[in-house]
Amino acid sequence: MLISCFPRVERGNRIILTGRSSKVGLQVKCRSDLLYLQLLTHEKSWDSFEKRVFGDQGSCPAELSEGGHQIVEKCQRLPLAVVLIAGVTVRGKKKEKDLCNII
């Protein structure tokens, strides 16, 4: 049923479906193998977030550390979530109250 929601797959087009459960991928009846990605450790999640948000500054300022770690925790070690939220964060003002609004 999910496949019927998308236009006909032409040569070169791809649909990427992500989820925590392999049952989702199996229900779609993909014509390729499922890829099983590992969750990040909390440390790797933080490193990725910090690098994307504060890369130009080198590291997260101490006053933003708690809010930043809360954001990373909400991402539940999912690589795509960390990257997406870091992208939203880097575009905003880097103040403690602003980080709390992202959570």
Image (tube, rainbow, N blue to C red):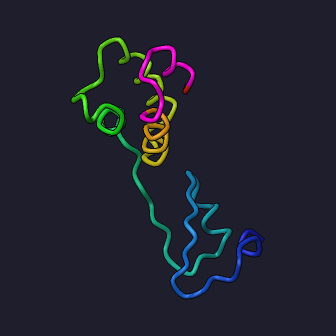
Is residue 25 shown left or right of residue 79? right
Q: Residue at x 40, y 16 (%)?
A: 66
Q: Residue furthest left?
A: 58
> Where in the figure is residue 92, as x and y percent of width and height?
48, 30
Residue 94 in magenta stretch:
yes
What's the magenta region? 90-101
> Where in the figure is residue 98, as x and y percent of width and height?
51, 20
Which image quarter is the C terminus in? top right
Indicate whether 30 appears above or below 72: below
| Quadrant assignment, res 83 | top left
Q: Residue at x 66, y 71 (%)?
A: 28
Residue 28 in magenta stretch:
no
> Where in the figure is residue 13, as x and y percent of width and height?
55, 79
Q: Residue at x 57, y 21 (%)?
A: 101
> Where in the figure is residue 32, as x and y percent of width and height?
51, 78
Indicate whether 54 appears above or below 98: below
Is residue 3 shown left or right of residue 32? right
Is residue 79 shown left or right of residue 58? right
Which image quarter is the N terminus in? bottom right
In this rendering, the count of numbered labels is 0
Q: Residue at x 51, y 83 (%)?
A: 12
